[in-house]
Amino acid sequence: MKSNKPNLRSVLFLIALLFFYSQGAKAGNGIILYTPYTYITVPPGESIDYTVEVKNYGSQVKDVEIDLSGLPEDWNSTLKAGGYSIKRIAVLPGEKKTVSLTLNVPLKVDKGKYNLRLIAKNYDVLPIVVNVSEEGTFKSEFSSDQINMEGHSKSNFNFSTKLKNHTGEKQLYSLMAAPPRGWNLAFKPNGRQATAVEIEAGKTTNITVEVQPSPQVTSGSYKIPVKATNKYSTAELELEVVIKGSYDMELTTPTGLLSSSITSGREKKLELLLRNTGSSELRNVSFSTSKPKDWEISIEPDTIVVVQAGGSTKVQAIIKSADKTIPGDYLPKITAKTPEVSSTAAIRVLVKTPLLWGWLGIFIILGTLGGIYYLFSKYGRR
């Protein structure tokens, strides 16, 4: 029995010959697509512009339908000629037309080769290979070597951060933050204050984040979220500021007026206000005084157990001037103090003469005048 293999081979060869002859006849009797760059390597996010010639080697006008096959998902393309987007183009015998093909490679794309085909339907196929050189991503990275700082309420905190653009093209980032109420925050890309920064593909920009706490801040830990965002991605970073206890106080009066008056030998009650202007509570506040000789000053209460940060409390100062104090201005001082901090209020006190002494002075003056009148009346004519 004879084998059928030679006959099968002959049939396959004939089919192949007819196929290639048919394709060659079509190309030789019609349209050829040509571009010089059929294998291009690009990074993610790149746009590729091809100049494609449509050549008519036939003897008749050809109306050619052109299509792109194998385009991956999320890629897009445009085909233009004469400034218009086209789908078909007519070419005279022996002439050629130029069309522009643009491929837009997305930012988020796998590394590797992508095989596309530009097809002149029923005439020719132009293979195109796009080699994506690296893994594409929308990712951006906001980082810092030190995200935690500690200081007192009057400190300025400067964080050194880095913003990296991992995408395949230049990006414009808006810089935003959500600090606690009353705090001030500023971004300084490359040393200059700004609310946005432009970064080239694959590059990193240094950004200083300056943080200034509120003057009324209390001790504790505070989170400060910051972010850089654009239409493709958002990069976030959380900074932390730890406020240590700061101690400060002010001793004054409820009106802020540190002056009064008193009658010599009498006492005067004066209301004082102690404010805690620090970020830590004040404990065991005591009082001391500096006063003129023979004066007396007492404070009620003489000790305050605690004053909360940002809080205040009232005390009463009882000031008694010495008997026979000469009228005029005096400056007794009252000091509030803890082991950490103190505050002194200097109170200008005007001392007045007692009313009794005033009338006595008037009587003395009147008596003196009366005596002089009597002497002039009795001895004035001699």
Image (spheres, rainbow, N blue to C red):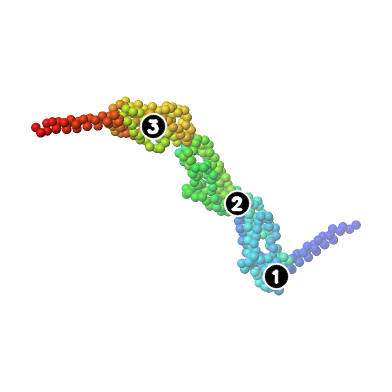
Instruction: Give x and y (percent) for residue 285.
Output: 44, 29
- Residue most extreme to the top: 294
Instruction: Give x and y (percent) for residue 298.
Output: 38, 27
Residue bearing mark 2: 232
Q: Earlier in the sequence, mark 3 or mark 1?
A: 1
Classed neighbour count for the residue bearing mark 3: other residues with Cα under 10 Å, few (<14), some (14–19), many (≥20):
some
At label 1, the amino acid type is Asp
Single out the mark in the foreground, 2 or 3. 3
Residue bearing mark 3: 270
Which numbered disc covers residue 215? none
The residue drawn where x is 73% and y is 66% is 122
Residue bearing mark 1: 63
Confirm whether residue 70 shows in the render. yes
Tell whether label 1 touches label 2 (CB within 8 Å): no
Instruction: Give x and y (percent) for residue 257.
Output: 38, 37
The residue drawn where x is 26% and y is 29% is 360
In the rendered structure, the answer to whether residue 32 lies left or right of residue 250 reads right
* Residue 225 vertical position relative to residue 93 in the rendered view, above or below: above
The residue drawn where x is 66% and y is 55% is 74
What quarter of the picture does the C terminus occupy? top left
